[in-house]
Structures are given as structure tokens and as C-alpha cells.
């Protein structure tokens, strides 16, 4: 049976600091994914990942356990993302990584979409999604990222952001509307 | 009515719509909203459009996550402990002596001790010096004791290791000796057997005298 997050936390607080690495292995992928989609740059996402786990380790005694550890971790990561966005300002939106997982650069301009292989069309669409997502205000972007990619429930998102569930739904609705408009514009521009 | 570019649906059920869209509606909510969809074209259109947006969003997948190198940060106490551990026991003791002396001096200097004048604690400079000297002597004795104990422990350890090595070497030699002995016994037995065969072949009596005067 897999050891729970709470058990690992107990072990860490009891002095077995290496046990915390289990939590890092378990949650590094979601935290990296969240950070990458919030910030758009691999380098920033890696840094936020490091900062998040370091902050969680340092403040582990403050974690009360009335919320899920993952919610607490997501909150720390989002705070780190917001802090980074504030520091970099609008530069972030202009410097989104336009590479896929294999490091290939996406090419946006293509004259004939029908002739494009399916993968390439999909890649181009992914670029449009990145651009549209990063053009959204952060409060809408984070809700879409948590709901769509991290598959958190409305209640979990509300807990992480410390806002009512109705606000989460409202932001998601508006965010999806804006995404639709932006994606349509990007498609028309091609 | 077309609500595409508006922030609100005329029916006011945008929250119900996203709840339904993401499959978080209860059975009753689902039935209620599906009934509403039959009547509200705006919600139907919005639902389809959002479905397409979700399909588009799904094209951005993060295939891998880089490994996060996490090393638990050291506390200040850990750093001090490591620093202390780097020094031999006598150095640690010396430092402690220094600290002890400094503490005593600082504590007493607060009373405004001057040569020949008693301070508010009723101690003269000579008495202070005596106290400091005693503290230093006590600390030195303690260090010496600790050093002797470490030395004795080291000696015991050394003797034990030496004994163990000695036993090991003796056992190895004994084993080799036994092997050689066993080999020699086998050789002698073989030679005796050959000797006996030759004698019986030539029908030599055991008690015959040899020409060179040796008899068996």
C-alpha cells in the first residue's frame, strides 16, 4: 500500500528529512505542469518547482492538515507564479516557449493547413492555445489550468484560491468565453 | 439570442453550465439542466463552443517533467554541529574553555571591578582572577579527562583489532600447515604402498638384512 502524504509529512517532521523527497517525486510533475502553463517558460517553471518544494519543506510545521497537502502545495506554487509574473510584468507574455516536448520549434505561418500532417496541425493548435491562455488575466488562467489540466474539482480550486465555489465557476465561464474568442481570432489570423 | 460576446447568459445559468460541462453536476442538477437545454438555445450553443475550446486546450500536453533536485536545507543548528564536529576534541575543549572564561569575565566586568576596589558583588580583582583561574583549571582538567578517556578507548580498540588480526593470521597458518601435513601423509602412504607391492613382487622378506647393513 502506498504511503500517504500525511504519513510522509509525519516522518519528515520527526526528523527523517529525506522522506520529503518522496513528496517531491510524487508532486513534481503536477507542480511543474501548473507552473509551465501559468508562466509559459520551462526555465521559470523549473525555478518555481524548486521554490515551491523548498518553501513547503521550510513551512511544513505550519501545514495544519485540515486541507489536502496537494492543495497547500498548489497554493504555494501559484503564489510563486504570481510573484514571478509581477517581477517580469508583460515580458512573460512575449517570451512564451514555442517549443514542443522534443525541443522542436513551432512554426506558426503555413499556407495550406490541409497539406499539413496531423501532428503539425496539432502542434500549431497547441501554440495558439498557449498564446490564448497567456493572454488571459492570471485569475482566469489559473482556474482554467487547474480545472482543465490538473483536473481538480471546483471545491478544491476554491480551497486553494480561498474564494467561493461560485466565483471559481464564474471565472471559469468567463475564461472559457475569452479563450474561444481569442482562439477564433488566432485562427482567422493564420 | 446570441450570447457569444457577452459575459452573461440571458438565462443566468452560467454556473450550472460549467458544472454540467465538467461533469460535476448531481443527478438532479443534470436532469434539470438537460431540461433547460431543450429550451435555451444560448446555453446549447455555449456548451458546444466550450466543448471545442476544451478540445483545443487538450492539445497542449506536458509530456515530461524535469527532475526536481531537492536537498533538504540545513538548519543553523546543523551547520554549527557540523562545524564543531570538524575540530578534534581538544580544540573543542579549548574553545569551550575560552567561552567559559569569557562568560565569567563578562559577568563580572558588569560590576565595575577595578584594582583594589571591591565591586557590588563584594569581589576584589584578585578574587575574580581566582574564580577565572579556577574555571579555566576545571575546564582544562575536564578536557584532559575526556582526552584520556578517548585515548584509553582508542587503545582498547587498537588492542582488540590487533588480537583479532593475530587470531586470523594464526588460523590461516594452522590451516596451511594442516594441508601440508595431509599432503605429506598421502605421499608417505602412497610410497609405502608402492614399497609393499615391490616387496611382494620380488618376495622379499621383511626381516631380511640389506646388503648395506641396514635391517628392518
Image: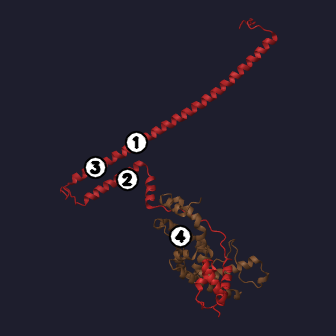
Measured as percent of width and height from the top left, residue A107 is found at 71, 80
Question: Do tags 2 and 3 sit on the same chain?
Answer: yes
- The residue labelled by disc 4 is A73
Decide: is B114 above or below A179.
Answer: above
Closer to the camera in the image, B5 or B62: B5
Q: Tag 4, which secondary structure?
A: helix
Q: Quadrant of residue A95?
A: bottom right
| Drawing shade for chain B | red
Using the image, name the chain to which the residue with label 4 belongs: A
Residue found farthest to the bottom: B1
Label located before the other in sequence (1 or 3): 3
Q: Write the residue at 75% across / 17% down.
A: B193
Which mark, by number, is residue B133? 3
Using the image, name the chain to which the residue with label 3 belongs: B
Label located before the other in sequence (1 or 2): 2
* C-alpha gap between disc 4 and disc 1: 51 Å
Which chain: brown?
A
Measured as percent of width and height from the top left, residue B99 is found at 34, 55
Q: Are marks 4 and 2 in contact (CB under 8 Å)?
A: no
How has the structure been colored for display? by chain
Q: Tag 2, which secondary structure?
A: helix
Which mark, by number, is residue B149? 1
Question: Do tags 4 and 2 sit on the same chain?
Answer: no
- The residue labelled by disc 2 is B95
Q: Tag 3, which secondary structure?
A: helix
Using the image, name the chain to which the residue with label 1 belongs: B
Decide: is B199 above or below A88.
Answer: above
Q: Write the residue at 31% across / 57% down.
A: B103
Amino acid at each position: 500500500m502506498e504511503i500517504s502524504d500525511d504519513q510522509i509529512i509525519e516522518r519528515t517532521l520527526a526528523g527523517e528529512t529525506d522522506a520529503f523527497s518522496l513528496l517531491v517525486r510524487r508532486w513534481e510533475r503536477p507542480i511543474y505542469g501548473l507552473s509551465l502553463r501559468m508562466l509559459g517558460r520551462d526555465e521559470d517553471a523549473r525555478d518555481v518547482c524548486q521554490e515551491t518544494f523548498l518553501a513547503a519543506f521550510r513551512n511544513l510545521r505550519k501545514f495544519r492538515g485540515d486541507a489536502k497537502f496537494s492543495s497547500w502545495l498548489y497554493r504555494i506554487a501559484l503564489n510563486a507564479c504570481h510573484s514571478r509574473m509581477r517581477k517580469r510584468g508583460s515580458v512573460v507574455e512575449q517570451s512564451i516557449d514555442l517549443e514542443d516536448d522534443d525541443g522542436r520549434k513551432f512554426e506558426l505561418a503555413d499556407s495550406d493547413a490541409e497539406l499539413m500532417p496531423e501532428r503539425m496541425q496539432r502542434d500549431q493548435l497547441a501554440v495558439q492555445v498557449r498564446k490564448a491562455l497567456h493572454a488571459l488575466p492570471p485569475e482566469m488562467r489559473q482556474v482554467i489550468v487547474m480545472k482543465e489540466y490538473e483536473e481538480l474539482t471546483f471545491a478544491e480550486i476554491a480551497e486553494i484560491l480561498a474564494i467561493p465555489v461560485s466565483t471559481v465557476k464564474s471565472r471559469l465561464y468567463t475564461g472559457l468565453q475569452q479563450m474561444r474568442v481569442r482562439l477564433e481570432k488566432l485562427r482567422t489570423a493564420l | 439570442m446570441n450570447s457569444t460576446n457577452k459575459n452573461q447568459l440571458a438565462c443566468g445559468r452560467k454556473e450550472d453550465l460549467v458544472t454540467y460541462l465538467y461533469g460535476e453536476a448531481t443527478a438532479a442538477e443534470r436532469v434539470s439542466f438537460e431540461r433547460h437545454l431543450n429550451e435555451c438555445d444560448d446555453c446549447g450553443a455555449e456548451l458546444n463552443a466550450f466543448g471545442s475550446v476544451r478540445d483545443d486546450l487538450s492539445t497542449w500536453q506536458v509530456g515530461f517533467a524535469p527532475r526536481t533536485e531537492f536537498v533538504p536545507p540545513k538548519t543553523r543548528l546543523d551547520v554549527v554541529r557540523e562545524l564543531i564536529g570538524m575540530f578534534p576534541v581538544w580544540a573543542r575543549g579549548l574553545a569551550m574553555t575560552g567561552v567559559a572564561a569569557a562568560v565569567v569575565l563578562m559577568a563580572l566586568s558588569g560590576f565595575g571591578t577595578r584594582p583594589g576596589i571591591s565591586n557590588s558583588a563584594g569581589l576584589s580583582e584578585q578574587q575574580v582572577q581566582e574564580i577565572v583561574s579556577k574555571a579555566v583549571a576545571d575546564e582544562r582538567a575536564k578536557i584532559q579527562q575526556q582526552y584520556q578517556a578517548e585515548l584509553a578507548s582508542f587503545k582498547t580498540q587498537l588492542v582488540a583489532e590487533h588480537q583479532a588480526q593475530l587470531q586470523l593470521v594464526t588460523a590461516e597458518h594452522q590451516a596451511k600447515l594442516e594441508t601440508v601435513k595431509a599432503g605429506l601423509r598421502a605421499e608417505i602412504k602412497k610410497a609405502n604402498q608402492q614399497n609393499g607391492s615391490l616387496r611382494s613382487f620380488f618376495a622379499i622378506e621383511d626381516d631380511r638384512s640389506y646388503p648395506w647393513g641396514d635391517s628392518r
